[in-house]
Amino acid sequence: MLTNERHEFILNMLAEKQTIKIQDVVDATAASESTIRRDLTELENQQKLERVFGGAVLPGRNLMEQSVSDKSTQHLQEKIRLARFAATFVQEGESVFLDAGTTTFQMIPFLKDKKITVVTNGLTHVELLNEHGITTYLTGGLMKSKTGALVGAQTAQSLQNYRFDRCFLGVNGIHEEYGYTTPDPEEAAVKRLASSLSRKAYVLADHSKYNKVSFAKIMDLAAAVMVVDKMPDDILAVMEKKTTVKVES
Amino acid sequence: MLTNERHEFILNMLAEKQTIKIQDVVDATAASESTIRRDLTELENQQKLERVFGGAVLPGRNLMEQSVSDKSTQHLQEKIRLARFAATFVQEGESVFLDAGTTTFQMIPFLKDKKITVVTNGLTHVELLNEHGITTYLTGGLMKSKTGALVGAQTAQSLQNYRFDRCFLGVNGIHEEYGYTTPDPEEAAVKRLASSLSRKAYVLADHSKYNKVSFAKIMDLAAAVMVVDKMPDDILAVMEKKTTVKVES
DNA sequence: ACAGTATGAACGTTTTTGATTGATTTTAAA
DNA sequence: TTTAAAATCAATCAAAAACGTTCATACTGT
């Protein structure tokens, strides 16, 4: 049995059983314990698995878990429902911009079977997009360690090279008078530019964002289609004067 | 059996079984082991297959393994020593380009206390750089899932906006006549451009790369300072005609 | 006949492998 | 909680397998 075959075998075995013990692999492959041990060490270096005492387990979804863990589960469920709905707008063959942010991040699993091209300025996004086999371009720019977003002049210049069919943005504040806002002026600039380069722009917002105002203005409410969920009826009444879409539940 | 016939036979056998062992081919063709070996080497140069220890696999089948993996621990130790040495060239306040690649990746921990600005096209690099508190710009571009590198026209355009004091590149092959080579033409283009934008370019290479020739040429040997480690003395004799630096051990 | 290429055997080198050792971690009993 | 036994681990070493290189020979087409 070739080394590569053995590696693939181990990964298959792991994918199937979630957890493997070294002895099980030894028995199944007829290779020595030392060899299997070496295989596991190398596969761990490749981040294809994670070693534990006695065997190995599937690698942790570090980035996703990280970005997901800081929000409450209820909020997360809401975001996922919102994201799934937003993803239905995307048609085959389109080009899409995904803003860096946790809500747009949740859209990715729902895009996996569409033949689309995605551009994003989110570092965490590009990895998940690739795992789902979606052709992905990353904008250049300065890395903001806190949010994993790329911003600045380079990002703007990169964006100028693209035109999008659809553009999905996350925001921190929604206000009738002050429009969409977010804490970071540089990220706001990226969002504004992306939406101006897009045939159609969508803002993904759960109810917690309404009537909040953050530091940096992105644009007026009317400049994008707002995809909302669980908003109080009186708010929706105001919103429906604008182009607003509500999740069908 | 004619050479061409044998080649075709091997490719058919490979297409059918996904992976082949040298001994199996020897038995099936009644040719000598040497001949089959030569066949495989040539077919690999034609990118018709990919050699692994003991046989060959379909190309692109598990390139993930080759590119992301860092082979044995011994190789890794060698790379780390090389990386530490290379990092000593970087002075305070300089701007540095770090190529996507495993050897340059190992440099990052040794850069952490310097006040420098780093530009990279490596997705994995930018995260570690940020953990070490280093100001980091990422080039834009198309995401290559195999290597985690950004490539293409966007990457080139992003790079044009910078000038570097130093630029560190990984390569797959070093050859007196054919220069530095790497498997992917697009990555080669990025490396070449980056080095041309840099006051000083360094190629990091362990001894396993010497006398290897990969598919895409990056540039001639003389175009960069080669940082080598553990190279046989006779090779060094040749090298020292060029600008070459050896790790002090 | 001759130059150029392909072949197979032989050689020394590199890589992989399995067994052994002593250290470390877990488990279970005191 | 402490202690001892069992299991697992990393490190080392030598044997085996696979490797590239060289060289002499056989084959090819001109």
Image: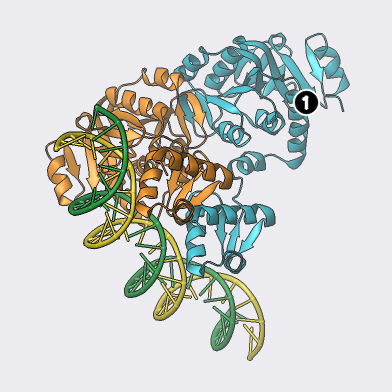
Chain colours: A cyan, B orange, C yellow, D green
Is B145 rendered above or below residue A55?
above
Amino acid identity at mark 1: Phe
Quarter of the C terminus of chain B within the rendering = bottom left
* Residue A121 appearing in the image: no
Vertical arrangement, residue C6 with respect to residue A24, above or below: above
Q: Position of residue D6 (x, y in %)?
A: 59, 82
Residue A178 placement, left or right of B201: right
Residue B225 horizontal/vertical position (percent): 21, 35
Quadrant where the N terminus of chain B is found in the figure: top left
In the rendered structure, the residue with mark 1 lies on which chain? Answer: A
- Res. A84 image quadrant: top right
Q: Which residue is mark 1?
A: A85
Quadrant position of residue B168: top left
Q: How many other residues sit within 10 Å of disc 1, few (<14), some (14-19) or many (≥20)?
A: many
State the residue in front, A62 or A74: A62
User: Residue at the spot x=44%, y=18% of the render?
Assistant: B153
- On screen, residue A61 versus residue B87, left or right, reads right
What residue is rendered at 22% in x and 29% in y? B223
At 52% from the left and 44% from the top, the residue drawn is B14
